[in-house]
């Protein structure tokens, strides 16, 4: 992997996307996790779709259920969204820089808001598979940060209260929870899940927190939405499998797509 300055690399990626799309500025960036990809087609017409490996600093995701492209779409209500379908996870072993690269690229393209989605495990018995949960905070259990150097970033409102209110206007019944990011790729043990629950985590997964930190450093407002794909270890009635995670996402797909598209429409009008 390149050792190039990550902020310079993000600027190069943004310039490449500008040249290929003919779009100078985007308003919104979106990372679609497990179960959320169906929302993309409801967001507007494609301006350009770029293979990840052709954009500086990006590579195809090594995870089943994740994409390998970056797409710019024109939103029905005006403006443009960058859909980052080439998410890199910390457990892929590429380092923390590539995990944050998509977020930083979006910021260099002018985005002011970022929507992060994921599939996750639940420690709340009432939140079974198929439940969508707004994130109100996170616990970073990865023992790392995407920030380089002495850059002190306030995370008091890491997940924008304003954007959460926008989401609740679309669906007042959306619950809110705290997400704990583990490094992965193994699923958490029952003891680890119990620890996370004691620390205040309602949800556990392997993404999102590091991306949020990078986004807040870049000045982006963040809206996080998790799809519960399974009860976490110790809360689940059966052993966990990635196939079950993908199936839960597929089952909830149409409803999630409609929810996310409606939230983005509401955001563009607020």
Image (tube, grey):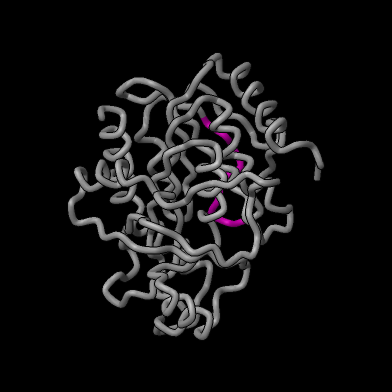
178, 186: nearer the viewer? 178
Of residue 116 and residue 247, the one placed in the foreground of this image is: 116
Which of the image's four quarters has the C terminus? top left
Q: List x then y, in percent, for residue 214.
A: 57, 45
* Rendered location of residue 194, percent (x, y): 46, 82
Magenta-colored segment: predominant secondary structure: loop
53 lies left or right of 3 = left
Residue nearest the observer in this picture, 196 or 258: 196
Residue 49, placed above or below residue 103: above
Q: Residue at x 44, y 83 (%)?
A: 238
Q: Is residue 64 above or below residue 51?
A: below
The quadrant of the image that shows the N terminus is top right
Q: Quadrant of residue 138?
A: bottom left
As for residue 135 lying within the magenta part, the answer is: no
Is residue 67 inside the magenta stretch? yes
- Residue at image position (26%, 27%) is 269
Residue at 29% across, 40% down:
263
Q: Is residue 48 above or below residue 229?
A: above
Q: Nearer the viewer, residue 23 or 48?
A: 23
Give the residue at x 62% y 26%.
Answer: 14
Q: How many marks?
A: 0
Q: Magenta part of the protein: which range? A: 63-71
Figure check: 92 above or below 263: below
């Amino acid at each position: 992997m390149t050792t190039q300055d990550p902020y310079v690399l993000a600027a190069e990626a943004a310039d490449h996307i500008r040249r290929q799309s003919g779009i100078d500025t985007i308003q919104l960036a979106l990372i679609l996790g497990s179960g959320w990809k169906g929302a993309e087609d409801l967001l507007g017409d494609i301006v350009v779709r770029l293979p990840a490996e052709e954009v500086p600093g990006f590579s195809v995701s090594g995870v089943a259920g994740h994409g390998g492209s970056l797409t710019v779409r024109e939103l029905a209500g005006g403006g443009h969204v960058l859909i980052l379908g080439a998410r890199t996870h910390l457990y892929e072993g590429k380092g923390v820089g590539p995990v944050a690269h998509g977020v930083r690229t979006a910021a260099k393209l002018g985005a002011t808001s970022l929507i992060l989605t994921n599939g996750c495990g639940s420690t709340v018995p009432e939140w079974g598979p198929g439940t969508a949960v707004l994130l109100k905070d996170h616990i970073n259990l990865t023992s790392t940060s995407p920030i380089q150097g002495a850059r002190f970033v306030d995370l008091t409102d890491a997940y924008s209260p304003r954007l959460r209110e926008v989401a609740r206007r679309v669906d007042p019944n959306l619950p809110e929870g705290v997400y704990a990011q583990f490094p992965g790729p193994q699923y958490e043990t029952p003891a680890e899940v119990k620890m996370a629950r004691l620390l205040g985590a309602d949800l556990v997964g392997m993404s999102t927190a590091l991306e949020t930190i990078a986004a807040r450093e870049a000045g982006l407002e963040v809206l996080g939405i998790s799809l519960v794909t399974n009860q976490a270890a110790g809360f689940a009635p059966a052993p966990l499998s990635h196939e079950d995670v993908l199936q839960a996402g597929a089952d909830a797909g149409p409803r999630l797509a409609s929810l996310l598209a409606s939230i983005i429409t509401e955001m563009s009008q607020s």
